[in-house]
Image (tube, grey):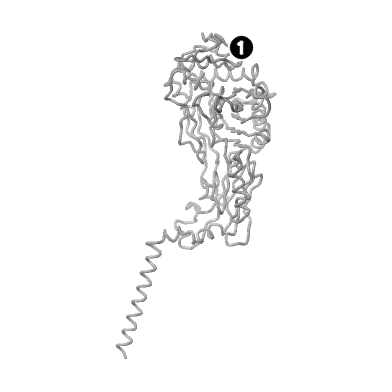
Amino acid sequence: MTRHIRHAALFCALLLVALLVNAARVQVLHAEDYEANPANRRASIVRYQQPRGDIWVDGRPVTGSRDTGEHLRYERTYSDGPLYAPVTGFASQEYGTTLLEATEDAVLSGAAPVLQPLPLWNEFTRSSSAGGDVLTTIDPRAQRAAYEGLRGRKGAVAAVEPSTGRILALVSVPSYDPEPLSGNGRTAREAWARLNADPDRPMLNRAVQRTYPPGSTFKVVTAAAALDAGVVKGVDEPTRSPDPYLLPGTTTRLVNGTDKCRNATLRDAFVRSCNTVFAQLGVGTGVSRLRRTAESFGFNDADLRIPFPVAPSTFDTTVDAAQLALSSIGQYNTRATPLQMAMVAAAVASGGQVREPYLVERTTRASGGTVSAAGSGAVRRAMLPATASRLRELMRGVVEDGTGGKAAIEGAVVGGKTGTAQHGLGNSGMPYAWFISWAQREDEMEPKVAVAVVVEDGEGNRREISGGGTAAPVARAVMEAVLRPG
């Protein structure tokens, strides 16, 4: 009898060992396979079992969480969703996350190890940390001014603080409401299908994810390169430029949209936006020096993050002299995001220095304790201080005496540059209207805001579309919002 009991006990022990071996196999060797299996909803249930942290603008959350009472318990909600969608992106149980919701997901969801009270605490207690918050640099008045200024027209606005790189506004129109995408049911699927089928692409963040030919706004970069290189000695000296200008090595004549450009001074050429003058200056400066200046401003940078990725603005370096002439006036292959052109204006405003733009001021725990804090980022010099001073003078002339008059603000010093960029096959598309600018109050020592506005396919007569008439009023509204006391 004892022998049978011993055999039974041994058999049970073997069964126990087999169970332990199988459990180890499942939990160690195949853990990743089971975790990635679409049928495993445990991770999703845990992820949505608690409210998500919030994204804040000027002391107010613009996101929230709604208790659905379902297995995936909490869904994301948005205040002023279309206004802040180019900043927040969306957080969807079905379609994932974008923009700040994506780059700051670890903090917002509570998964970031830094949110745990102690190292490995959550692993031992099987608990989750409460989601943290993300505080942005956005100025709500500037954001709303940009959004309302573009309402009804496709386009984008980016505004930065020149002295720090803080992003004050980031607007893309048409926009969308992220909230219907938050769940995983029919409403989310219908919203997703509708938004993706829309030819105006409302989920595209035009301020940072799309590049445009910058047109005459790029003449700021060309002027900076020419002045730094000594190709032009002063802003009031004749440039010895013809009108029209024969593109080197071709029979193509480049003309101007205005008169009095022949042998114009740099000051007059800048105010009148003479294509012939800047095309010749670009060729005289050379591709190497022009490339170096453009890259100092931020062109050809594929690594810019704010913290989500920004599409690289491009200045083609594999060009012949004729193509360089066109590149120098913001055409050919020259492309820029609105954020990049706001950085160009900011560099002029800050004495030639470029500061990396950033969108997140700090992240915090649910209790309010700081997890991480931002500050003025890396600084590089785009041009000599004397060149920046001259360009500020030229940009003021555009607003005070030229095509940028609609950007003027009473009680403020404003500098700007208009641009109208051709595009499409044979330049058949409706031109893009650009305006870049900076502004400071007369009683302050330095500019407080730099803005770039692009308006796509403006309504009305093709000849009536211009940066000064279409985009400058939007920039003025944004600058006024930032400069306004209180």
Three-letter amino acid code at the position of disc 1: Asp
Residue 160: name its quadrant: top right
Residue 236 vertical placement versus 406 (above, below): above
Residue 124 vertical placement versus 194 (above, below): below
Q: Residue furthest bottom?
A: 1
Q: Please state the horizontal and vertical placement of residue 338, each as a whole percent of the image.
A: 56, 31
Tell which of 181 and 132 is nearer to you.
181
Residue 275 vertical placement versus 366 (above, below): above
How many numbered marks are there? 1
Q: Residue furthest left?
A: 3
Quadrant location, the N terminus: bottom left
Q: Please state the horizontal and vertical placement of residue 92, each as a whole percent of the image.
A: 57, 51
Q: Please state the horizontal and vertical placement of residue 14, each as a whole percent of the image.
A: 33, 76
Residue 285: name its quadrant: top left
Residue 84 vertical placement versus 237 (above, below): below
Which residue is found at the position 50% from the left and 20% from the top?
A: 326
Indicate the secondary structure of the residue bearing disc 1. loop
Q: Which residue is mark 1?
A: 259
Which residue is found at the position 58% from the left and 11% from the top?
A: 261
Residue 275: name its quadrant: top right
Using residue 345 as the reference point, say whether residue 471 is left or right of it.
right
Using residue 47 as the reference point, say whether residue 27 is left or right of it.
left
Quadrant location, the C terminus: top right
Q: Residue furthest right?
A: 410
Q: Is residue 62 something one can see in this rendering?
A: yes
